[in-house]
Each structure stands twice: as structure tokens, then as C-alpha cells.
Image (cartoon, coloured by chain):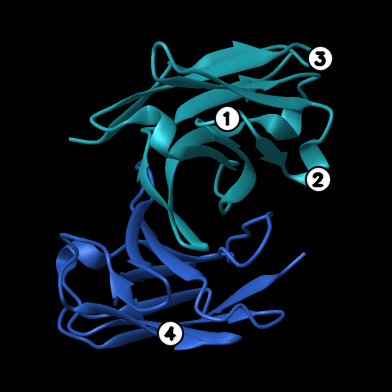
Chain colours: A blue, B cyan
Amino acid sequence: DIQMTQSPSSLSASVGDRVTITCRASQSISSYLNWYQQKPGKAPKLLIYAASSSQSGVPSRFSGSGSGTDFTLTIGSLQPEDFATYYCQQSYSTPPFTFGPGTKVDIK
Amino acid sequence: QVQLVQSGAEVKKPGASVKVSCKASGYTFTSYGISWVRQAPGQGLEWMGWISAYNGNTNYAQKLQGRVTMTTDTSTSTAYMELRSLRSDDTAVYYCARVVVIITNNWFDPWGQGTLVTVSS
């Protein structure tokens, strides 16, 4: 099975900061990488699919990049509503479609 | 709008079974799959498996093989996930999500609101 790692596991940032979260796959997954945002007590929400395509309605400050084994989610200017946990997920080839362990973004 | 609405919270004893439902609306049910994901308290997301609402084909996570069954009822646009022989470490919030497939890529959108399943004696 493909394993996913994320770094950092948590970070503290201020409103207006540029935030970068990294996701790494244990083998090449081309661009089969999705990003989700989860707020406490809520279901995850799709932000980015196919590594760099933004889901409709997602603010433009969220962007994704990467291919192969290394991927990045960037929040251009952190807003109060962006404090949440972010998960990457690989959807390469056959299941299981594993998730990364998550990155919690909280207020500095 | 596209929506998935799940059944309510459940409390079960060890060894029992639970069946969670996920009713879809706002789209053609048989044109997409449904995946199930669970989240233990304070933990990350664990993919459990998925089912094609078109033909009923399933694929389950290896660790749950033999204990989980996913089904659909196309007449009511509802997906079901049954987990048997429950253990305390099955305590989690269970989510369903629509699987969007474009060529060979897929992603989960939207998600149901979640169903808390508590396993306790």
C-alpha cells in the first residue's frame, strides 16, 4: 500500500501569514493527490483535487502543486476561518486511497 | 444541491453489528460511487472502502475484510455500511462521501455529516 506523510504535523501562524504544508507519498502517484480541510466537529471538505485543481467555491488563496512523490498545499494569506486540520489523500491506481496523518493549523 | 445525509448516532456492545445509512440527493445516484471513511476520536481519517452505485462493485480496506459490507439501494438513493463483530477500537465517526471519477482520477465530494458509533459494554 502507498503510505502518505505530512509535515509539519502542526503549526502556529498569524492571520495574513503565508502557510505551506507538505505531503509526501511512498511511491510516485503522478498527480493523483487531493487536499481536504476539516474543522472541529465537521466533515472534511474538498479543497484541491488532482494536485493543483481548485474545487469550485474554494477561495483563491488556497493552491496546490507537485507531482510524483512531493506535493504542497499553500494558503496565500491565512484568514481566521482557515484554522483547521488539513489532510492529503492519494487516489492513484487501485485502492486503498490512503490519507496523510493531517496538519493542524492553529492561531499563534 | 448535492447532499448526503447520514443516520443518527449509535451505541453498540462489543460483538454486535451496526448499519449506517447515507441518503443522497441532488444528483444521479447511479452515476457515482460512495466511499466510507472513519475517524476515531482525536485521530486522522481512515479509508474503509467504496461501492459503485452503478453496479454494486465494492473494494474494502484489507484490515476490515470479512467484517464490513457496503451496499446500495438505488430505489431510494441510499448507501449502507454494515460493520460486524464490533470492538472498542471501532468507536469512531463514520462518514460517507460521493466519489467523483474523472478519467482515472477520483476524489471525495461532498461528504455526509458523519455518524458517531460508540462501542462500549
Q: Earlier in the sequence, mark 2 or mark 1?
A: 1
Q: Are marks 2 and 1 in contact (CB under 8 Å)?
A: no
Chain letter, disc 1 residue = B
* Residue B17 found in image quarter: top right
Q: CA distance from mark 2 to mark 3?
A: 20 Å
Q: Are marks 3 and 4 in contact (CB under 8 Å)?
A: no
- Can you tell which mark lies on residue B15? 3
Question: Where does the image place residue A101, in percent across and percent down from the top left?
Answer: 59, 64
Categorize mark 4 by other alpha carbons within 10 Å: few (<14), some (14-19), many (20+).
many
Q: What residue type is disc 2 on? A: Gln
Q: CA distance from mark 3 to mark 4?
A: 42 Å
List the residue tagged with mark 2. B62
Quarter of the image with the N terminus of chain B is top left
- Which residue shows up at 64% across the image and 30% down it? B91
Categorize mark 1 by other alpha carbons within 10 Å: few (<14), some (14-19), many (20+).
few
List the residue tagged with mark 1. B55
Categorize mark 3 by other alpha carbons within 10 Å: few (<14), some (14-19), many (20+).
few
* Residue B110 found in image quarter: top left
Q: Tag 4's secondary structure?
A: strand
Do marks 1 and 4 share a subunit? no
In this view, B96 is above or below B80: below
